[in-house]
Image (cartoon, helix red, strand yellow):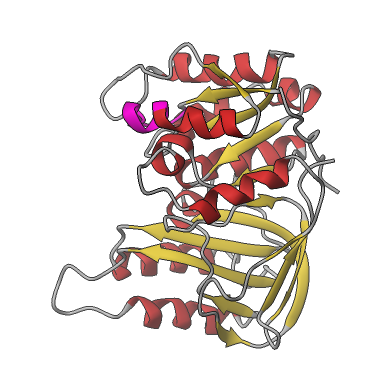
Amino acid sequence: MGVKPQRLKIGDTIGIIAPASPPNQENLLRSFAFLEELGLKVKLGKHVYDQYGYLAGKDKDRLEDLHTMFLDSEVKAVICAGGGYGTGRIASQIDYKMIKNHPKIFWGYSDITFLHTAIRQQTGLITFHGPMLASDIGKVDADPVSKEYFKQLFEPASIQYPNDLSQLEVLIDGKVGGEITGGNLSLIASTIGTAFEIDTKGKLLLIEDINEEPRSIDRMLNQLYMAGKLSEASGLIIGDFNNCVPERELSLELDEVISHYTYLANIPALKGFKFGHCSPHISIPLGVHAEMDTSQKRLIIDSGVQ
């Protein structure tokens, strides 16, 4: 059973970090108004505006911001400004014992998937897969539905995926339960062979991605399949694959690739969830129990806070 962080209360302080690439500064600034509407205060990491090539500062500085926010007793949740690339570079240097001793809400997606997997498997902490401040919430056209799901941080309540939001498609029938794990496919695949290799045994595996050709999705799913990660899972939750289209004339379609590996794994699978690089983007806790019933096209997820 995972460790659920304490829920938020009006007046709580949120720590904002950029553990991957430099966030869009205008969007980040705009997102603060949303947090304030929720009744929250904002505390910025010292290195949020740093730039070091495609990274939001040197590894030691991004690591320092992460550690500082978990240690700061005033900060009740750590929310990532954006993704991009870079969290895998700091994963082996994180003080997981400290995080375990100071459990709190941790929120992000995309490149943050590496941290979700590492933190949960090293500490047991439930973390949240959801839209980020500069990448999503601070955009001028940010979807109100995406914003609505931040309210799960204030009240322990299970989440039922809203079926009217997107057309769900059954790939393999079944009724299954298990802890939710996963996130961005590229980052899941990059854990294989490391100390943070994703554990999917008996779990519901969530996958999503952006800007990857079908052949790249094929390569990553094949790696997961050969590593036993697909067959060991209890079920497959297929999120949004934004702009994952062929750049060459001779190609398989994305649907063909996903179907191929789903049928090889032979586990219940539902496709079409608005999880990932999409708008709206439904946020959910990772590491909690969930139930998926393909006949009802239903996904119910336990609360991530206590």
Q: Is residue 202 visible?
A: no
- Front-lying residue, 272 or 222: 272
In the rendered structure, does residue 20 fall within the stretch colored magenta? yes
Quarter of the image where the C terminus is located: top right
**Horizontal and vertical percent position of residue 211:** 30, 57
In the rendered view, would you say 273 is above or below 173?
A: above
**Horizontal and vertical percent position of residue 294:** 67, 83
Please give the range of residues in magenta: 19-29
Left or right: residue 276 compared with residue 248: right
In the rendered structure, does residue 123 fall within the stretch colored magenta? no
Residue at 74% over, 67% down: 300
In the rendered view, would you say 172 is above or below 2?
A: below
- Front-lying residue, 253 or 276: 276
Q: Is residue 12 visible?
A: yes
**Horizontal and vertical percent position of residue 269:** 60, 78
Residue at 45% over, 69% down: 222
